[in-house]
Amino acid sequence: MDGTAAAGDRNPAGGPAGPSGADHGPEAGRTGAGQASVPNGLAGADAGRSAGQSGVTDSGTDSAAGTGRAATPNGLADPADTGAPGGTSGDAPKKSSGRTGRNLPAAVGVGVALGAVVIGSLYFVKVAFLVVVLVAIGVGIHEIVKAFGGFGIRVPLPPLLAGMAAMVLGPYWGGTTFLVGAFSVTVMVLLVWRMFQGAEGFVRDATAAVFVAVYPALLAGFVPLLLAPEDGPDRVIVFVVVTVCSDIGGYFAGIFFGRHRMSPLISPKKTWEGFAGSTLACVVGGALLVHFLLQGEYWEGAVVGVAGVVCATLGDLIESVIKRDIGIKDMGTLLPGHGGAMDRLDSLLFTLVPVWLLLTLLVPVA
């Protein structure tokens, strides 16, 4: 998620004009970055990183990003979110979407629709929420496996989806014991599955497969643990809303006050001012929700809010690092104005386990 962005992680439309269109054509992809003389495109990757650090990007549009990927077969080109905060990236996107760099009406519409699905499934048919989680995480795993495949990493999808289903559904009835067992069996099956495909690249592919079994599958396995108690739906609402508060608070604080970049090399649009807005929103939201929904103390909710904003921000940065490493901007295009499923799940996944743990310790079920 883009909680602490000065204007979202996408290039703003209001930035100064970048290089001319000729610099971004096929000729630039072949010769401007020096990739014709380096077959693996490593020089082009270094050039892209240098350009990103100077606030000028060469992949601000889909066509330019496609050119960058074609010229660098190993996928080492940086994604197109390397502009400086406050609208100083080089190229404007193909279609203007205001200061935020995203299609805000579409993003809001999708967010409202997802919220309705979450609330409806939680409070009308409690277990149905697990089906929503199952679909969302399944799409996210598909996006990651597809992205890794473009990078030359083979990750077996069928055993991952089966293991994820066991981890998301089983713990609702079997608890943490079932979750640990399902995860362990999933890892064993992944290793054996990959073994029969040959020794070449085994360690690389198996490591990536286990990574996906942890992120997002194992982390999502804590949703049924959060949902299982009698007041489980309220606990899930606390977790989701606190995470959303981080995104919304950072989004608006970053737009209006963002000046100091938080992590220029990872996600240049995120600012400390945006993080302050996220913190305020999470602390207030957490305190109110824990008090009124779970009958906890205000300070307990504030603690949950602090943990939520830290973990949501880290989850967003982790996702940015993954996308930067494999040279893509978004994990997918499923959700208009948001990107792929994983582009919405990143902060939620990283916030889930700490919030579950804190609520279990501080606000036990009555």
Image: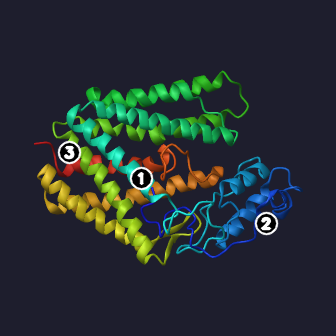
In the picture, the quarter occupied by the C terminus is top left
Q: Counting residues from the N terminus, which is met first, the one under dot 3 or under dot 2?
A: 2
Whether the residues at callouts 3 and 2 have beta carbons within 8 Å, the answer is no
Residue type pointed to by label 1: Ser
Residue type pointed to by label 2: Asp
Marks 3 and 2 sit apart, C-alpha to C-alpha, by: 53 Å
Marks 3 and 1 sit apart, C-alpha to C-alpha, by: 19 Å
Q: Secondary structure at mark 1?
A: helix
Check disc 2 and report the residue beneath it: 23
Residue type pointed to by label 3: Asp
Around disc 1, counting alpha carbons within 10 Å, would you say few (fewer than 14), some (14 to 19), or many (20 or more)? Answer: many
Q: Residue at x 71, y 57 (%)?
A: 64
Check disc 1 and report the residue beneath it: 347
Residue 285 in the image, given as x and y percentages of width and height: 24, 60
Q: Is residue 57 left or right of residue 38?
A: left
Q: Counting residues from the N terminus, which is met first, the one under dot 3 or under dot 1?
A: 3
**How many marks overall?**
3
Location of residue 223 (image quadrant) = top left
Location of residue 321 (image quadrant) = bottom right
Marks 1 and 2 sit apart, C-alpha to C-alpha, by: 36 Å
Q: Which label number is shown at residue 234?
A: 3
Residue 299 in the image, given as x and y percentages of width and height: 18, 63
Location of residue 134 (image quadrant) = top left
Q: Residue at x 44, y 49 (%)?
A: 344
Q: Counting residues from the N terminus, which is met first, the one under dot 1 or under dot 2?
A: 2
Q: Secondary structure at mark 2?
A: helix
